[in-house]
Amino acid sequence: MPKREKSQAVFDRAMNVLSKGVSSNFRYWGPDSTPVVKRGKGAMVWDADGNQFIDYRLGWGPIILGHADDRVNEAVAKAIENGTTFAATTELEVEVAERLVEMVPGMEMLRFTNTGTESTMHALRVARGCTGREKFIKFEGQYHGAHDYVLFSTASSAIEDLGHRDAPLAAQIGGGIPAKIKEYLYLLPFNDFEAVEKTVIDHHDEIAAMMIEPCLGNISGLEPDEGFLEHLRKLCDDHGIVMIFDEVKTGFRLVNGGAREAYGVIPDISTYAKSLGNGYPVAAFGGKREMMEQIGSGSITHAGTFGANGSSMAAAKAVLEILKASPVLRDLSRRGERLKAGMDTVLTDAGIPHQMTGHPNMQGFLLTETPAKEVRDLIHHNDELYDAIAKHLYENGVWVEMDAREPLFICEAHSDEIIDETLNRFEDAVASSKK
Ligand SMILES: Cc1ncc(COP(=O)(O)O)c(C=O)c1O
């Protein structure tokens, strides 16, 4: 382990005042190993002991340009001189919304929130409000945030808890959720054309929405099979179901127009957060005008004190301007492809059965002989070897999540040199982990 005296001292204090010493369950690694970060710049982060890491977690995806990006920080610093929260519309907010409408295909109207969780919660409410139906389809292994309706059969669920593939069970994540909530859900395996079709045909009268991560941003970036999203689009169209893309991870990361553009399928509503603010808390949901116009005037509620606050809007405006002005995401894909090809070669040369997954800007590698298309296939995954590789990387200054389900994220600041250095260390990690 890298030295951690200072980190441990801070974490011991954290354990006294923060539940499990963290502000999100997934940040807790254990009493003696939970990391404490001091700062980040570009593609690098430093922990409280000064250990430096090439960062592929990027805060679980939001950092698209680089940590502490000067262009974004300067825009925020300037904007906050004028105040941040007014309980009123601002011109800055309108400018960001206009930019979003311009960049995202089929986006007609939106509302800002602060987190992905708020966005998926409101998107679901809009779908229910517009259709007058209450249930929705959710795919196993997808994570849509921390509100009650979606905390079932996510990336964190044990595969044994998902039940039989033909009759999936709702695996609840944690306590405190009313038992009846699961009755609002149809849980289905991703990429299963027939299972969705059957559920829709049998139950469409009660299904308000399909909530879809267009590629599995919480399962190693696994992508939809050819025609799968189109199949879902058609089922939604034929049966009056609202198609929701959860683009919290894919939005402003895959390409400028997100998964809508990358996969050429336009949902009715989609949700955004993460990359939109390069680390500032900003999120949005939006889509078809006829649906978004139902919000307000007492018909469908969306509210929030901090929605479209000045610091987040300034960050989002800067991010969108940068993405629009230069081919950031295209260049990033080129470097992401190099990383992917390099890791593929290392694993192949080492004779390790594996599958390279995901879009180059949000990619992963699974250590499995059986090709994975959805979360249940991870039952064949070699978790032990993955852990050993991830741990060796961490001990040698490359930080990927200690869990194959979370993709590696690339940002503008991951230069070719950084990718090369990563590949060198990856080769060492694989060699030393392979027994
Ligand atoms: C696809 C997806 N949707 C929604 C969320 C929830 O976003 P937030 O953590 O900002 O509430 C996440 C978080 O990782 C996510 O990956």
Image (cartoon, rainbow, N blue to C red):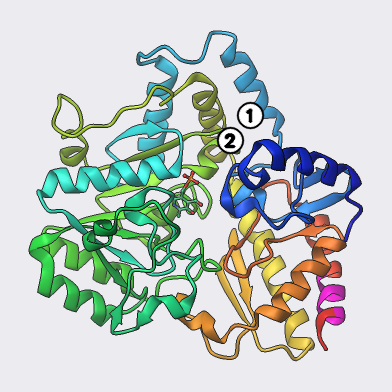
Does residue 22 appear in the picture of this structure? yes
**Residue shown at 75%/47% (left/top)?**
43
| Quadrant of image for the C terminus | bottom right
Whole-percent x and y of residue 420?
82, 63
Q: Is residue 3 above or below residue 304?
A: below
- Tell me the crowding category of disc 1: few under 14, some 14 to 19, or many 20 or more residues within 10 angstroms, Cα based: many
Residue type at mark 1? Val
Q: In the figure, is residue 20 to the left or right of 97?
A: right
- Tell me the crowding category of disc 2: few under 14, some 14 to 19, or many 20 or more residues within 10 angstroms, Cα based: some
Residue type at mark 2? Ile
**Residue shown at 88%/61% (left/top)?**
1
Q: Is residue 367 above or below residue 114?
A: below
Corner quadrant of residue 382: bottom right
Corner quadrant of residue 402: bottom right
CA separation in Å, label 2 and label 1: 9 Å
Q: Which residue is mark 1?
A: 72
Q: Which residue is mark 2?
A: 322
Task: Report the disc number at residue 83.
Answer: none
The main secondary structure of the magenta stretch is: helix
Image marks 2 and 1: residues in contact by CB distance under 8 Å: yes
Whole-percent x and y of residue 341?
69, 74
Q: Is residue 392 magenta?
A: no
Span of residues in magenta:
426-432
Q: Is residue 261 above or below residue 16?
A: below
The local secondary structure at tag 2 comes to helix
